[in-house]
Image: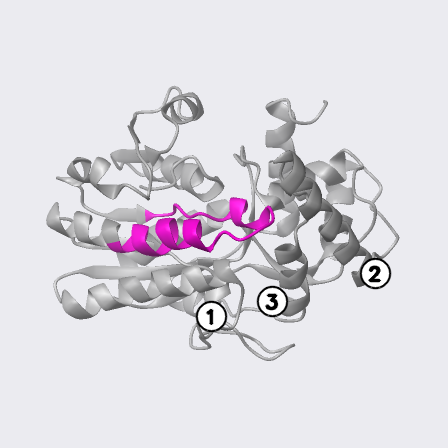
């Protein structure tokens, strides 16, 4: 498994172990992975998607590859990241497919994204509504091209099985990054949010996405996409759920769009001068505007073909907050 220490990856590792699988977990940091999986029977392999040959030999004897690694969070920290996105997400996927096949692997689960889909505002979006390569930011483009690498490999290797799972905005326990989703939860609990930003998102539990990954391998159809996006919500709704879970009052003031652009401009300038992460980037604001009203995704195919359903958002947020509290991110 690539990306084993990420939010999706570490939940998938645990679920696979619970089901009796033997897991080889690829991680950039041996120290982080060893600490994260302490007490679990996991073989940690240190490696990076920009150098697949470094760990290619470890895939010998492997039944299937779950590809969850991606250059993502860093791409929202300001500035141009296309070179890194292309190297890790596109070329990395291509090289991983070739190395896995050479090692004898014939099954592959690609972690795609709702970013590869698009539809009219207010529409129910399904797996057939593909986004064009030039319609979106660089991260979106990298995910579209990565999926094309998988599709191309399938076309030229008829004995190879691969499926695509398309997660939404993942929350859940084990988010040690933290991801943007986890950081939002932490900022809410620590009362650092100045107001309610505009936009809608599709919220899903990383554990449910992990279930979808395994189900797609076991019951999915070759070359098919399976949306695992979750529930369409606006930020006011998410904050309301967090208020119920934590007892922390939700912000009431709605943040106007122009204010977000001003904050993003300041944060990007600060990031360039100090090399510190931008808490809000231009890319993030543009994404919020572009995808507002385009976050209602159909789960029909996932339910009918794979039998996977989503748990309530409140349960997800409660478990996420509990995990952060238990691990010292939030005061008890």
Query: In the visual, does 42 lie left or right of 328?
Result: left
The dot on residue 256 is 2
Residue furthest front as drawn: 273
> Residue 250, how many percent across, how many down?
82, 46
Nearer the observer: mark 2 or 1; the answer is 2
Nearer the observer: mark 2 or 3; the answer is 2
Q: Residues within 10 Å of mark 3 (few under 14, many from 20)?
A: many
CB within 8 Å, label 3 to label 1 = no
Q: Which residue is mark 1?
A: 300
The dot on residue 169 is none
Q: Which of disc 1 and disc 2 is earlier in sequence?
A: 2
The quarter of the picture where the C terminus appears is top right
Highlighted range, magenta:
67-94
Q: Residue at x 61, y 71 (%)?
A: 294
Q: Which residue is mark 3?
A: 295
Placement of 119 over or under 41, stated as above or below? below
Does residue 168 belong to the magenta stretch?
Answer: no
SS category of the residue bearing label 3: loop
How many numbered discs sit on the rendered protein? Answer: 3
Does residue 80 belong to the magenta stretch?
Answer: yes
């Amino acid at each position: 498994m690539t990306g084993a220490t990420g939010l999706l990856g570490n939940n998938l590792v645990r679920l696979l172990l619970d089901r009796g699988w033997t897991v080889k977990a690829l991680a950039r940091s041996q120290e982080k992975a060893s600490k994260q999986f302490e007490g679990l029977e996991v073989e940690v392999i240190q490696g990076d998607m920009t150098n697949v040959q470094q760990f290619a030999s470890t895939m010998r004897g492997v039944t299937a590859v779950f590809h969850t690694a991606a250059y993502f969070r860093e791409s929202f920290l300001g500035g141009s990241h296309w070179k890194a996105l292309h190297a890790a997400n596109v070329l990395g996927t291509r090289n991983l497919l070739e190395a896995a096949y050479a090692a004898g692997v014939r099954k592959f689960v690609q972690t795609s994204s709702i970013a590869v889909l698009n539809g009219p505002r207010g529409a129910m979006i399904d797996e057939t509504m593909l986004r064009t390569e030039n319609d979106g930011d660089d991260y979106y483009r990298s995910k579209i091209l990565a999926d094309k690498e998988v599709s191309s490999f399938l076309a030229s290797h008829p004995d190879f099985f691969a499926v695509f799972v398309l997660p939404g905005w993942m929350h859940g326990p084990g988010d040690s990054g933290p991801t943007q989703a986890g950081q939002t939860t932490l900022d809410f609990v620590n009362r650092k949010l100045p107001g309610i930003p505009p936009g809608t998102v599709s919220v899903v539990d990383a554990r449910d996405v992990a279930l979808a990954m395994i189900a797609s391998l076991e019951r999915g159809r070759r070359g098919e996409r399976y949306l695992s996006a979750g529930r369409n919500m606006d930020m006011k709704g998410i904050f309301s759920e967090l208020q119920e879970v934590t007892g922390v009052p939700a912000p009431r003031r709605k943040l106007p769009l122009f204010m977000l652009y001003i904050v993003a401009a300041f944060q990007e300038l600060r990031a360039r001068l100090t090399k510190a992460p931008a808490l809000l980037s231009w890319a993030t604001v543009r994404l919020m505007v572009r995808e507002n009203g385009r976050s209602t995704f159909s789960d029909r195919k996932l339910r009918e073909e794979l039998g996977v359903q989503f748990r309530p958002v409140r349960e997800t947020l409660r478990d996420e907050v509990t995990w952060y509290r238990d691990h010292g991110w939030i005061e008890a």
